[in-house]
Image (tube, rainbow, N blue to C red):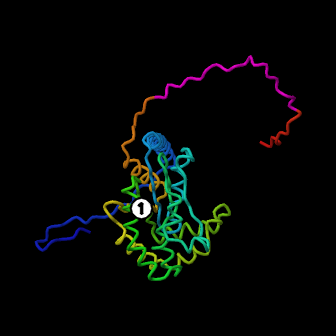
Amino acid sequence: MAKKTKDMQPVATVKNKKKKKLSRKAYEAELARLQVELSKLQEWVVDQGEKVVVIFEGRDAAGKGGTIARITARLNHRVCRVAALAKPTEREQSQWYFQRYVAHLPSAGEIVLFDRSWYNRAGVDRVMGFCSEEEYREFLRTCPQFERMLVRSGIRLIKYWFSVSAKEQERRFRSRIKDPLKSWKFSEMDLQSYMKWDEYSQAKDDMMNYTDSNQAPWFVVPSDSKRRARLNCITHLLSHFPYDKDPSTSGIELPDRDTDSGYVRPPMDDQRFIPEVY
């Protein structure tokens, strides 16, 4: 029902219309197009000697891993690699906090996608008590300085936060528990994060308040729709780079094979072939 002002003139209410579900056909067609663009970006990064770091953060089941998988699916893993660090060892725990992440930073002509990053200190470490209050405060003080150093060194740093609703996260968790192909994704830590929703929300707000800067801003990706989140994130990522969208063809032509070398193939029976089950 329309609201009315004091003079009784109707004022239309604004409603957030739910977007129509993106069909698989439309999604796959657009994803294929964007993956072509990513291959062009990869070529540009190599040619220009660029160093690129993309950070993916967000709650468990927010869709980070799926987006990373679509980005890397058609790329050269020697150029575009994923850094997904495990729990720090006892030795790593004694190091400067950023030290083990520095080892994974890119050289010229490389793209590194961090599936979670140094922001563990502001999220899971803080909420679950894996660090002291002083260690947490020190992170908030030094993280912006650390990232400014990366940017000044020539690294292109892009940070994404995948934002999923409580209702959608619950649906995805229940799906993981029931699906034997996804159950490995669900851990005790996921269960803890599920119960501590508000604490993680506060941790995220504080993190962004301290670490969202002009040099290294945070970009939020609404991710209740996985398909839209993937397409929107990839599109936004591509927009950061002045790569050649219409590169010239390589001009490579296949030469004739040398078939007159005298090579004789050994008998087929001398080799062990796998069973042709399919």
Please determine whether, in this image, residue 172 is positioned above or below residue 71: below
Tell whether 166 sits left or right of 180: left
From this viewpoint, which residue is outermost toward the right? 269
- In the depicted view, which residue is nearer to us: 246 or 20? 246
**Residue 274 at what x, y percent from top left?**
82, 42
Q: Is mark 1 on a helix, strand or loop?
A: strand
Tell whether 199 sits left or right of 187: left
Give me the residue at 79% from left, 19% from top.
Answer: 262
**Residue 112 at what x, y percent from top left?**
50, 54
Q: In which quarter of the image is residue 256?
A: top right
Q: Does the magenta portion include 108? A: no
Give the total of numbered labels.
1
Indicate the quadrant containing the C terminus: top left, top right, bottom left or bottom right. Answer: top right
Q: Is residue 29 visible?
A: no
Indicate the quadrant containing the N terminus: top left, top right, bottom left or bottom right. Answer: bottom left
Please determine whether, in this image, residue 27 is positioned above or below residue 162: above
Q: Residues within 10 Å of mark 1 (few under 14, many from 20)?
A: some
Quickly name the residue at label 1.
Answer: 222
Q: Is residue 35 visible?
A: yes
Please determine whether, in this image, residue 242 is positioned above or below residue 62: above
- In the depicted view, which residue is nearer to us: 217 or 146? 146
**Residue 50 at what x, y percent from top left?**
43, 47
From this viewpoint, which residue is outermost toward the top? 260
Which contiguous range is marked in magenta?
Answer: 249-268
Q: Is the magenta stretch mostly helix, strand or loop?
A: loop
Residue type at tag 1? Pro
Give me the residue at 42% from left, 41% from top.
Answer: 48
